[in-house]
Image (spheres, coloured by chain):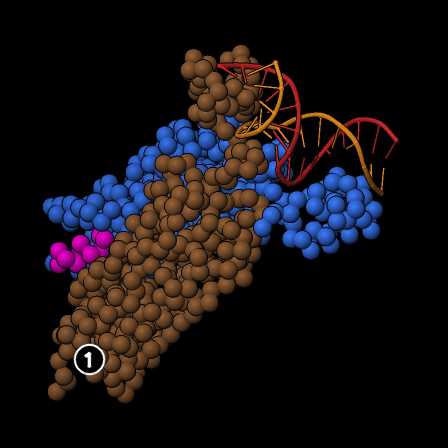
Chain colours: A brown, B blue, C red, D orange
Amino acid sequence: MKRPTIGDIAERAGVSRSAVSFALNGQPGVSDETRERVLAVAAEIGWRPHSAARALRGGRAGAIGLALQRPARLLGDEPFTMELISGLEAELSPRSCGLNLQVVEDTEAEIATYRRWWAEHRVDGVIVLNLCADDPRITVLEDLHLPAVVIGGPTGTGTLPSIWSQDAAGMTDVAEYLAALGHRRLAHVAGDPAMAHIVDRSAALHEVCRLRGLPEPVTVRADYSETDSAQATRRLLAMPERPTAIIYHSDLTAVTGLEVALEMGVRVPDDLSLVSFNDSRLCRLVNPKLTALAHDIPGRGAQAARMLFAAIDGSGEPGSQPAEPYRLLPRGSTGVHRAPH
Amino acid sequence: MKRPTIGDIAERAGVSRSAVSFALNGQPGVSDETRERVLAVAAEIGWRPHSAARALRGGRAGAIGLALQRPARLLGDEPFTMELISGLEAELSPRSCGLNLQVVEDTEAEIATYRRWWAEHRVDGVIVLNLCADDPRITVLEDLHLPAVVIGGPTGTGTLPSIWSQDAAGMTDVAEYLAALGHRRLAHVAGDPAMAHIVDRSAALHEVCRLRGLPEPVTVRADYSETDSAQATRRLLAMPERPTAIIYHSDLTAVTGLEVALEMGVRVPDDLSLVSFNDSRLCRLVNPKLTALAHDIPGRGAQAARMLFAAIDGSGEPGSQPAEPYRLLPRGSTGVHRAPH
DNA sequence: CTGAAAGCGCTTACAG
DNA sequence: CTGAAAGCGCTTACAG
């Protein structure tokens, strides 16, 4: 089976190839009658623009890129990525825009991927996840003039538009909620402190404790793996003055934390309250269900896609936008702190 | 910033553009000295092949396609897709091959996507998921001569190579295990009966019951949603002669089933044994942990990618291969059936 | 309103 | 061993 080309249409319709091109692209320069004939023939023989020819011509690649810097084994467990993708797709599909996915090892590999995509003319723009302090990806993308939207920020994104998730506000909400429940010794299990949203949340937590006159909150690091997050919770619960409430920066670490607490005979929420950043089926499956800070991840993906299209089209300065704020969903894992007798 | 082209290299190296092309592609026709000089210049100015130009030339698109026919809202919950993608990527990345993702509504839309990808020259091949009886996608892909690997089969895949997951064997294993535990009334909660693997598993379950002289197993349908799978389990547990063991065709339906059973005061595994096809973090999070039929999904993705490359290269007839068989992982959700007194 | 021509970046027969 | 030329499918100035 041979792909039909613009030449095949020209032949059948009895016009020149340029006339066909004008007709197909809605350009002036052909009569209405010719235009209709051309469109009819194109539809009849199932013509589609050859994406490579268009891209070569200087047009769009017709795809955007998403580099995932995640250990492969965690991609399945963590709902975030796939939810984001489903949100992106909701905007991409109607525009027949493709999504190029690449799993990368580290920031260096991610940058190499951006350079390659750019040089190979493979994508028209990219979505950047997990902004870090002094993120080297930003300047690279700026230098390449590769349109991009950062999920994270709003500071540290250079000239790139961003969607920022109001992490500080989310953390403030939950810390004040816990304080109101009578908790005084707060702790949090945080991901990579290089990530800007972790820093923002951490600062907000410290600030609430300071304002409320609570002791300095304890920070423990953990990646998303089962072993690491179990270890983090175990360490917190083994402290002489152990926290009465723990905030987790991801649903994966939170559910594991709950498991560990129950294994150690710590009652939730009687002895210990737990909160998860991000809500997912995982949070609702465990017993007690986890109190969570929920936000609409597919919605954010869709928003990011729209902003990226604006950046690619150069239609107005997109600038940065806040994402929908976190909603605190109190469930069974949080409760009033009663002083031990 | 301007993308360097082959012409830039030719100019700097003082040779013709064709010499550059030969040198870069390891073709004979240039002296070793020239070749080295060309490669050095290319590296120095950061040249990369323009993917569109190569694709237009009749070469590879440099990407494969994956159409996901899943309700968007479930993509995040279900670990399968992302695990498969991580496995695909493990093979794609080293070859600098891209992955084109597209979420589609239904089979018709999926076929339209294949036609579009083919006509637009966007992908060199595709991975097909969830094979159905008389699957219309097969003949379309055959007609288009678009290389494809089917995950599913081995029957009903036409001339396309496939990886088949030995679903019948997996179901036989688990049914015999349950029978050995003393269970006589088995039931299963199945996905769309149009899907070939559901049919295969169902047949295997019926066969084991027949051979063992057990009553005909009860079948209830459920999609992956929380409401539907809860409903399915509720219906089974409300039966006058309710089953003592339920097999779920996905981890999502299984964990929901467990929740429902516990809500209804049915003790697991004392009164009811539960088994999940597919293992995931979900199965290990609930209490009791779910007995599962595990298989290496990323491994299967990698295998599929390798087979697809073979099909694209036309290197040998790839044919169909079995995937690694399911492994039964007995956990807390299954136990010996004791006749009620 | 329409056609002939050039060119995007690359590869590959075809001459020298 | 190397260069000049054609062509992949499309778009867009440029002539008629």
- Left or right, residue A131 beside residue A218: right
> As rendered, which of B328 and A31 lies closer to the eye?
A31
Left or right of A241? Residue B47 is right
- Residue C15 place in picture, x, y as percent: 84, 27
Location of the C terminus of chain A (image quadrant): bottom left
Say which residue label 1 marks.
Answer: A212
Q: Position of residue B92 (x, y in %)?
A: 54, 49
Which of the 4 quarters of the picture holds residue A99?
top left
* Residue at image coords 48%, 20%: A29
Mark 1 element type: helix
Question: Magenta residues?
Answer: B256-265
Amino acid found under the numbered disc labelled 1: Arg
Magenta-colored segment: predominant secondary structure: helix
- Number of labels in the image equals 1
Using the rendered view, name the quadrant where residue A253 is placed: bottom left
Q: Is residue B272 above or below residue A30?
A: below
Q: Where the N terminus of chain A falls, by quadrant? A: top right
Along the line of sight, the residue nearer the viewer: B112 or A328: A328
The residue lying at 40 percent from left, 72 percent from top is A193
Q: Is residue B63 above or below residue A187?
A: above
At horizontal 26% and vertical 49% (from top left) the residue drawn is B253
Position of residue B274 in the picture relative to residue B111 (left or right): left
